[in-house]
Amino acid sequence: MPVKLSSSALKQTHWYEYAVRFVLGGVATVVAGLIGSRFGVSVGGLFLALPAIFCASATLIESHERRAKEKAGLSGKRRGQQAAALDAAGASLGSIGLAAFAAVFCVVVSTSAIGAFVAAILAWAAVSVSAWWLRRKLRITSHAVQVERIGQSARGRGLVP
């Protein structure tokens, strides 16, 4: 499935949803700052690395998907949960890439700041895409295994010839 950019989500989002994102993102940043001032910048940086907008975006994605299904006359609760879960999976893959960015930057910055940014961005992209690809392959494989197990179970019970 190719990645696509769609502006239709901007039209579906209400003004207050942007306000929620802004407030929750600000709160997450302030909490990270407080943790950093109490326990040091290294610990605070770990909390700041958490995408500050994730909490708000996950709830808004769930809400949008649920509303879209309900508008079509269906129960959208499960679909909203699945959409939020998919967003969380993407955020976790991006976080793995972010860790690679930080590690490469830390190693290279003493020689060249610009070189560190270039190397870190390349590492982030390579690790994030690789993690996405690996997750996709493992998911396809695990899905095939589940289908095979269901088929074996059905044959064992005499439901399938």
Image: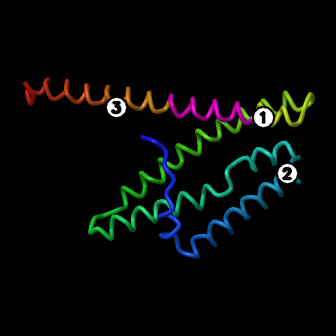
Mark 2 burial class by Cα count in 10 Å: few <14, some 14-19, many 20+: some
Q: Residue at x 61, y 35 (%)?
A: 128
Circle 1 residue: 118
Circle 2 residue: 36
Sequence-first disc among 3 and 1 = 1
Instruction: Find residue 106 and report its horizontal and vertical position in percent.
Output: 84, 32
Mark 1–mark 2 distance (CA, rounded to whole Å): 27 Å
**What secondary structure is found at the residue carrying circle 2?**
helix
Q: Which residue is the extreme one toward the right? A: 110
Instruction: Find residue 67 and report its horizontal and vertical position in percent.
Output: 39, 68
Instruction: Find residue 135 and report its horizontal and vertical position in percent.
Output: 49, 32
Mark 3–mark 2 distance (CA, rounded to whole Å): 42 Å
Q: Nearer the viewer, mark 1 or mark 2?
A: 1
Q: Main secondary structure of the magenta part?
A: helix
Q: Nearer the viewer, mark 3 or mark 2?
A: 3
Sequence-first disc among 1 and 2 = 2
Q: Residue at x 20, y 24 (%)?
A: 152
Label 3 is placed on what type of residue?
His
Q: Tell me: residue 91, above or below residue 158.
A: below
Q: Which residue is the extreme one toward the bottom? A: 15
Circle 3 residue: 143
Q: Quadrant of the N terminus?
A: top left
CB under 8 Å between callouts 1 and 2? no
Q: Nearer the viewer, residue 51 or 155?
A: 51
Label 1 is placed on what type of residue?
Val
| Residue 104 located left or right of residue 82 | right
Q: Residue at x 33, y 64 (%)?
A: 69
